[in-house]
Image (spheres, rainbow, N blue to C red):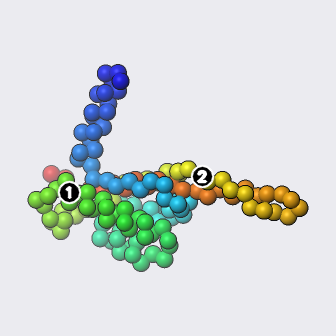
Amino acid sequence: MGARKREKATQRKEDNKTKYFAILRDCPTSPRKMRLLTDLIKGQNVERALHILKTSPKEASIRLEKLLLSAISNWQHKNEGERIEDNPLFVKEIKVDSGRQLKRLRTAPQGRGYRIRKRSNHVTLVIDNLVKE
């Protein structure tokens, strides 16, 4: 590894120490369906985002709720002496990337086959304090 790559990697590690995030990989939901929910909670207060996800009838909301709870848990782990009630948290950034696609064939009339693409996605959720010290 070269010097510049090493410096960039150490800089990225230092930045991640002050970030509070959680990553969900290979979620078997299409990215388009997941983005419908992520747009609802982006920029929201954490309690409000949890309420939105709990009341949403979509199947992807269950996975996003677990991911948000994991990010909150990561925040608590990095700030052990502080209470979550004293620090108002919000969803700073949420990003949905497409994951791998499983390609399948469905039988069709006259000996043909239609291609089915079973999509998956990766979700990265970052939370932060409303008030910076």
Of all residues shown, which one is farthest toward the top? 2
Of residues 34 and 63, which is closer to you in this image? 63
Instruction: Tell me residue 38's x, y (percent).
Output: 44, 62
Q: Which residue lies at the image location 30% right of the left edge and 59% below the top edge?
A: 71
First in sequence, mark 1 or 2: give its number: 1
Q: Quadrant of the N terminus?
A: top left
Query: From mark 1 to mark 2, how far is it between C-alphas?
Result: 34 Å
Q: Amino acid at mark 2?
A: Gln
Instruction: Tell me residue 77's x, y (percent).
Output: 20, 57
**SS for callout 1:** helix
**SS for callout 2:** strand
Q: Which residue lies at the image location 53% right of the left edge and 60% below the top edge?
A: 28
Q: Which mark is residue 129?
A: none
The answer to whether residue 32 is visible is no
Instruction: Tell me residue 30's x, y (percent).
Output: 56, 60
Q: Amino acid at mark 1?
A: His
Of residues 65 and 87, which is closer to you in this image? 65
Please name the residue that numbered disc 2 is placed on.
101
Q: Quick check: 124 left or right of 112?
A: left
Please name the residue that numbered disc 1 is placed on.
77
